[in-house]
Amino acid sequence: MIPTAIISHPDCALHDTGSYHPERAERTQVVVDALQRFFTGNELLWLEAEPAALKWIETVHDAAYVRQVEEVCLRGESVLDRGDTQVCEDSFAVARLAVGAGLMAVDVVMQGRAKNAFSVMRPPGHHAERAEAMGFCLFNNIAIAARYAQQRYGLSRVAIIDIDVHHGNGTQSAFYRDPTVFFVSFHQYPFYPGTGMKREIGDGPGEGFTLNIPLVAGASYAEYLSDWQTQVLPALQRFSPELILLSTGFDAHVDDPLANLNLNDADYHELTRLINDFALQSCDGRLVSIMEGGYSLDALARASICHVRALCNGK
């Protein structure tokens, strides 16, 4: 049996965001603990992340910005952006590990060592812009993974599906004029960061390769399923990706304290199953999931088990 790879690193805990910050060290640990308790056979391949080379980070971010992040962290400053992206001396190194986990996930899937992979790392990444940190994010882990897959493995069509409750503005902007990456985002709207309107469809050569699914507060899995069947799946089928990357935010959960969508544990299993089914049909199951948000520790642990069950079983 080909396993599902789980990639993490204990040094995630060194990224200290201070007291009472929702993006805290316990987030990755509760997921790792839950998966280790639930999966006791040979379903999972556990791997330890390695730091990404700066050249890969600079495929998405300006080199000057990368240096700025490093210098701010090494000086021991506590805030990187306008206030919500807290850092410490170790944050740059941990952020390189988070990027590296995404690259490792691409490697093990593309090389056939795992049928799919889940990166359980922090800080998250989908809000990070080319030269700006925001929304708890330093580097855009999933956007860098997409560029890595293209350059390392020669892929011409990569799809990114973002199911975090917040719109992945940084990921969208990275590929807004690029027809080789199809970006889909399910997100609460209007909500932070204020982007992700239906009319945002890409620009120039990338027009038609961005698909936003804004959801009103209180939306449930029924809305996700309808939009998947009527809008997302037909668009992805036309695009025919060679690899699917999934920004897996668990903050659309009904128990999450920072948002107002109503997915439950079973819904995360079903949503993952739909995406995994499409990956099996489109690209031999090549699917890489990268953890983004999720701020209720209990919900995060439960929903991550459901997510990985669907990755492992495909049903």
Image: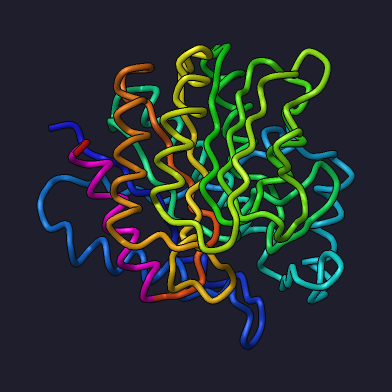
Name the residue located 81 percent from the left edge and 22 percent from the top edge.
203
Pinpoint residue 284: horizontal percent, then vertical percent.
31, 18
Q: Is residue 85 magenta?
A: no
Q: Is residue 307 magenta?
A: yes
> Furthest residue to the bottom?
19
Q: Nearer the viewer, residue 189 or 193?
A: 189
**Relative side of 214 to 194, left or right:** left
Name the residue located 77 percent from the left edge and 54 percent from the top edge.
194
Q: Nearer the viewer, residue 208 or 42?
A: 208
**Relative side of 225 to 132, left or right:** left
> Furthest residue to the right?
64
Q: Nearer the viewer, residue 276 or 87?
A: 276
18 shown above or below 193:
below
Report the predominant secondary structure element of the magenta stretch. helix
Quadrant placement of the C terminus: top left
Q: What kind of colouring is applied to the model shown?
A: rainbow
**Stretch of the chain drawn in magenta:** 298-313
Name the residue located 67 percent from the left edge and 28 percent from the top edge.
210
Quadrant placement of the N terminus: top left
Pinpoint residue 47: horizontal percent, then vertical percent.
35, 48
Pinpoint residue 209: horizontal percent, then vertical percent.
66, 21
Name the residue located 80 percent from the left edge and 48 percent from the top edge.
66
130 shown above or below 206:
below
Pinpoint residue 12: horizontal percent, then vertical percent.
52, 65
Circle count: 0
